[in-house]
Amino acid sequence: MKLWIGTDIEGVAGVVNREHTARDGREHDRARGWLTDEVNAAIAGAAAAGVTEFVVADGHGTCRNIFPDRLDPRARLATGQLSSLPPSAVQALDASCDAIFLVGFHARAGLHPGVLDHTSWSQTVSEVRINGAPVGECEINAAYAGELGVPVLLVSGDDVLAADIHGSMPWVRAAVVKRALGRFQAESLHPSLACARIREEAEEAIRDEAQWKSYQPSRPVTLELDFHHPMYVDLAVLVPGCRQTGPRSVAHTADDYLHAFGAFTAMCGVTGIAHYQHR
Ligand SMILES: [Zn+2]
């Protein structure tokens, strides 16, 4: 059995601030260690339930967060990113995987009091909707996996994320490692206990085959973005198939989610480049 583990860092126990998440943050290297430990805990739990093959995808910022030499040697590491594109925890996922975990994830943009809440390319994007419903990165990734027939079995992060996921994908197991108190504050489990919880939930998630369900939004699927500023709309509508739906909104409708996801990634990419040119 082959498991894909997509990772982020905002949802890791102890992480509450840009100092933890940014490449130049003073506590970033420590947070990278906590993330690596949580990923190893997920691998240990899944291995105890029979998983034999692991791919870990680093999906935050530069996608160079996990320490390769501290990662469980049973896993291969997908690290680094395509130039100028937003980071992704699923970009190289394929149908050879039997299931996916999402470790270290966070609440979607605007979901108070989620720790470090945002959705995807936070510099330009203020909300993402699938078929009209606001979604976070977990649903965006789960729909990508779902298109390939790969179910998301486990998500880890704060309690605000867990409650939101329970609404959108009630069959997905959540490992809650901290209680969100605000955008930059949390009551967090000790890292060792966070790892123990993830390990336990990971093992249960693999064993509980009755709950292996793919997240598949109805077709045709519409991915819609709200931008922080109307200038981004001028660029986003240049992506083939994209249309303006509001003063700051652009949508793409497709028969399969991979096409919509491709347009979404391109919209994030071109608006992100504009953001760095004009700030
Ligand atoms: Zn992130």
Image (cartoon, rainbow, N blue to C red):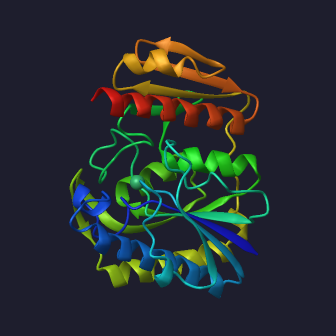
The quadrant of the rendering that contains the C terminus is: top left
Between 86 and 97, the one lying in front of the other is: 86
Residue 19 horizontal side relative to residue 200, left or right: left
Between 183 and 268, the one lying in front of the other is: 268
Residue 171 horizontal side relative to residue 26, left or right: right
Residue 195 horizontal side relative to residue 111, left or right: right
Between 17 and 215, the one lying in front of the other is: 17
The quadrant of the rendering that contains the N terminus is: bottom right
Q: Residue at x 47, y 83 (%)?
A: 70
Residue 82 vertical placement versus 43 (above, below): above
Q: Whereabouts is ligand 1, in terms of quadrant?
A: bottom left
Q: Residue at x 40, y 25 (%)?
A: 227
Residue 85 spot, x, y in % from top left: 52, 42
Residue 266 spot, x, y in % from top left: 57, 33
The reply to whether residue 133 is visible in this rendering is: no
The reply to whether residue 226 is visible in this rendering is: yes
Between 11 and 30, the one lying in front of the other is: 30
Residue 147 spot, x, y in % from top left: 73, 46
Quarter of the view holding residue 154 = bottom right
Q: Residue at x 43, y 83 (%)?
A: 196
Quarter of the view holding residue 48 = bottom right
Residue 110 spot, x, y in % from top left: 33, 38
Give the mark count: 0
Residue 170 horizontal side relative to residue 219, left or right: left
Residue that lies at the very extreme toward the right in this rendered image: 96
Q: Residue at x 70, y 49 (%)?
A: 146
